[in-house]
Image: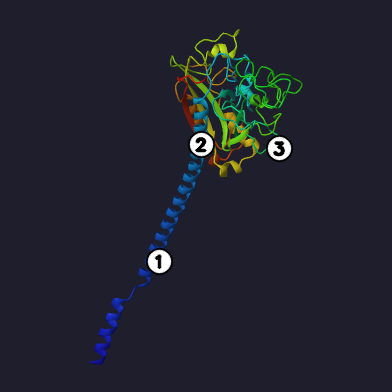
Amino acid sequence: MIMKRFAIVNAGRTRNAFTLIELLISLAVTALIILMVAQLMSSATAVTRTGNKHIDTSTQARVVLDRMAVDFAKMLKRTDIDYYIKAPSGYKNPKSHGKGNHLTKGQQGNDQIAFFSQVPGYYPSTSSQSPLSLVAYRINQNTTAGNPSYLMLERMGKGLLWNGASNGITSTSPYPIVFTTGQIDGTCTNKCPCAGTTGPWAGPWAAAICSDNTDPAPGSYETIGPGVFRLEYYFLLKDGTVTDVPAESWDSTKTVGANLNGFSDVQAIGVAIAVIDPANRSMLSQQQLLNIMSDLPDFATAHGNGYGNPAKTISFLETVWEGVLESIAQTGATSDGSAFPPAAASAVRIYNRYFDMRTPAGF
């Protein structure tokens, strides 16, 4: 009787226990679950990191383009003042395109622009300062080793005095004389700095036409887009043409201001920028950054072979840039065969905006 009860008890205990196989299976399932959770966490971290980088580039692009929107909206559109903008090949302003790296491919590099605008400037700080400024945008292309602003977007916003008013800087030739042509580029003849030249623009504000940091007066430019390494602009004319020539017809015997005629043919200025986040930029050498900048082609043929032969449509340039970046991300190399981190190429973002020029501004 006792033996029988003992057997029954043992049988019950056997039925309630786990076998070795069951334990192994449970451990395998637990390990699989832990692995899946770890992979999900890793993927979430990667997505978050990528999202943060995109936020960095988008925030910077928004700040830059919003600043441009104010400057372009307040631009003086007159026939009796000067501009420093794109023009047909060989005419007056060839340096509005900076020189790039892959010249054999027609690449001429970043654009540059300078104009007068009804926005307050920061120099000179006197009681007679007017709300008029000389505004300029450029990508700093000084290749000096250690240049902290290399391939960064910079803006000039020099406050000007009223026409002919003395600003206390020079007693013999007060400047600028705003309402006359030849003021931005007329005296410097594209030399930076303007050593040995004379005239109202041979001094502190000659930097408006320089593409590097060899400015006669330090501080002429300030960095507003440290992640922006590529700048290109073009024009949407009122006849629907998207071009790099800011007029429906161009007479090379006339001045830029006469051809522009107060931007009468221009519906909007389109601006395209390429932006990289700080983390990926810090991993690139100066040469690598120059290589990817140079692979993003110019808009058209006015200053190089570029992509200007066929008729262009809105967002054409941005689409081409996106294709170039995808190619570099897939191959891990720029067009000259130099190695380039695919992750950094994938992190570059392209932004564009059109600035309406239909409403005249000026005095």
Which quarter of the figure has residue 104? top right
Mark 1 vs mark 2: in front = 2
The reply to whether residue 337 is visible in this rendering is: no
Towards the viewer: 75 or 137: 75
The mark nearer the N terminus, 2 or 3, is 2
The percent coordinates of residue 325 (x first, y second) are 52, 33
Does residue 138 appear to the left or right of 44 in the view shown?
right
Q: In the displayed structure, would residue 354 be above or below residue 41?
A: above
Which amino acid is tagged 2? Val
Quick check: 250 left or right of 1?
right
Quickly name the residue at label 3: 145
- How many marks overall? 3
Give x and y (percent) for residue 163: 62, 20
Q: Which residue is mark 1?
A: 27
Which residue matches tag 2?
63
Q: CA distance from mark 1 to mark 2?
A: 54 Å
Q: Disc 2 vs disc 3: which is toward the camera?
A: 2
Q: CA distance from mark 2 to mark 3?
A: 28 Å
Label 1 vs 2, first from the N-terminus: 1
